[in-house]
């Protein structure tokens, strides 16, 4: 699998997507927001979301939890090493693009919804 060449962009070029239309629950508005997300993900590769409805307190607690986790000694973080479901801690150099020989100098914690083994998304041939 090939990956796009990296590029440098100005902060002002990062799309800011208003998520409030999606939250209205109307198909037309949701489709428009989804279309903007797709264009941003395919073009720039990332984006900002505003009017997402997540309370500031929840965001602040998430940042604090991440800061607390990543400030721990490596030996403790390794207790939560990435598992067969691809959830957990990755230390420096473990999150690497398949074909790249370059080391990724970051730590990561991958999380998501744990699905039962019999769920169609788990049993499917398509990841």
Image: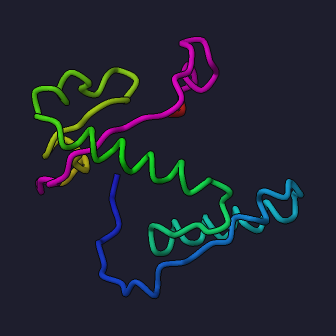
Residue at left 85%, top 58%? 24
Side (left or right) of 2 relative to 113: left
Q: Quadrant of residue 94?
A: top left
Relative to 4, is 112 above or below? above
Is residue 119 on the magenta stretch? yes
The residue depicted at 50 percent of the width and 74 percent of the height is: 43
Position of residue 39 in the picture relative to residue 102 (left or right): right
In the image: residue 56, left or right of residue 23: left
Q: Is residue 51 above or below residue 10?
A: above
Q: Residue at x 27, y 38 (%)?
A: 69
In the rendered picture of this protein, how many numbered marks are placed on residues? 0
Q: Is residue 78 left or right of residue 85?
A: left
The spot of residue 20 in percent (x, y) is 75, 65
The answer to which quarter of the image holds residue 100 is bottom left
Asked whether residue 52 is drawn in magenta, I would say no
Q: Main secondary structure of the magenta part?
A: loop
Q: How is the image coloured?
A: rainbow
Q: Which residues are magenta?
A: 101-125
Residue 84 location (% of width, % of height): 34, 20
- Residue at point 40% right, 83% down? 11
Q: Decide: is 1 above or below 80.
A: below
Residue 23 horizontal/vertical position (percent): 78, 56
The image shows residue 7, relative to residue 121, as above or below, that is: below
At which x and y percent is residue 3?
Answer: 33, 61
């Amino acid at each position: 699998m090939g990956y796009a060449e990296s590029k440098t962009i100005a902060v002002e070029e990062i799309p800011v997507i208003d998520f409030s239309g999606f939250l209205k629950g109307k198909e037309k508005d949701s489709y428009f927001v989804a279309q903007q997300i797709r264009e941003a993900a395919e073009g720039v590769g990332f984006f900002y979301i505003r009017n997402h409805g997540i309370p500031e307190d929840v965001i602040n607690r998430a940042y604090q939890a991440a800061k607390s986790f990543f400030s721990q000694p490596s030996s403790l973080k390794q207790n939560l090493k990435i598992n067969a479901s691809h959830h957990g801690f990755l230390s420096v150099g473990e999150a690497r693009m398949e074909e790249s020989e370059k080391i990724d100098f970051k730590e990561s914690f991958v999380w998501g919804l744990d699905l039962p083994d019999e769920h169609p998304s788990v049993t499917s041939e398509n990841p």
